[in-house]
Amino acid sequence: MVKYAFFLTCLSAGLLNGQPVEIGAKGAVSLTGTTPYNFWHDESKRYQVGPYLEVRLPARFAIEVDALYQRVGQSATFAFGPTTVQPGSAPQTVIQGVWFNRLRGNSWQFPILAKYYLRPASATWQPFVALGPSIRRVGSYTDTNEITIDQQAGATRYNIHSEYTNWTVGGTAAAGVRWHKGRFAITPEFRFTRWAQNNGNNLSRNAAAIFIGFGF
């Protein structure tokens, strides 16, 4: 996946040959959780990291393409019972059990942002705003385990392991400041993304994060 992202950014640079290009890396700290449900325990890493490429265009515009990685995960445990069952004249059966589910996955995000700088490129610091689509790919696996106990059948246990890959798209808005000295640049910014889907009911549709980038 990293190879494909790098190829895409290089291709974009080639198509826009002759324009100033900035490359670097960005890291982020999430301000929102990744799980959409309160009863799930969010075990995702709070950080994202990855390379970026920016092509400067005339009239203070630019295009930025990122490839951001995040490790995601969540878990939940439920205990149920005891429940008394009286099927006709048969003896009572007391049933109780425990259900446990755990998800682990890798999330890749590919924002493609159109940026506008409020000050010219010659300025040391340049506030900017950005807007554009984002693509998210999540490959994950889920382990589900359940144990039930009743007076007649004793203990029953089962487990299910499933894997899946899910793609979704969303819209990203950002605002920040680019500070540069010669070729070196530092870019703190705030981003918010609203996803069209929640990747198979596993990830939240809303994501806000603080980013900082280092480029040249």
Image (spheres, rainbow, N blue to C red):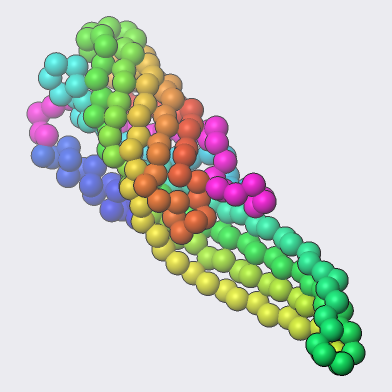
Say which residue appears at 10% left-offset and 39% top-offset: 15
Seen in the picture, residue 35 relative to 212 is either above or below; the reply is below
Closer to us: 69 or 206: 206
Magenta stretch containing residue 10, yes or no? no
Closer to us: 84 or 173: 84
- Image quarter where the C terminus lies is top left
Say which residue appears at 17% left-offset and 37% top-offset: 13
Magenta stretch containing residue 21, yes or no? yes
Residue 170 image offset from top left, x and y in percent? 34, 43
Which quadrant of the structure image shows residue 9? top left
Seen in the picture, residue 183 relative to 131 is either above or below; the reply is above
Closer to us: 115 or 170: 170
Instruction: Locate residue 165 relative to residue 63 in the image: left or right.
Output: right
Residue 80 image offset from top left, x and y in percent? 78, 67
The segment highlighted magenta reads 16-41
Say which residue appears at 57% left-offset and 74% top-offset: 161
Q: Is residue 50 visible?
A: no
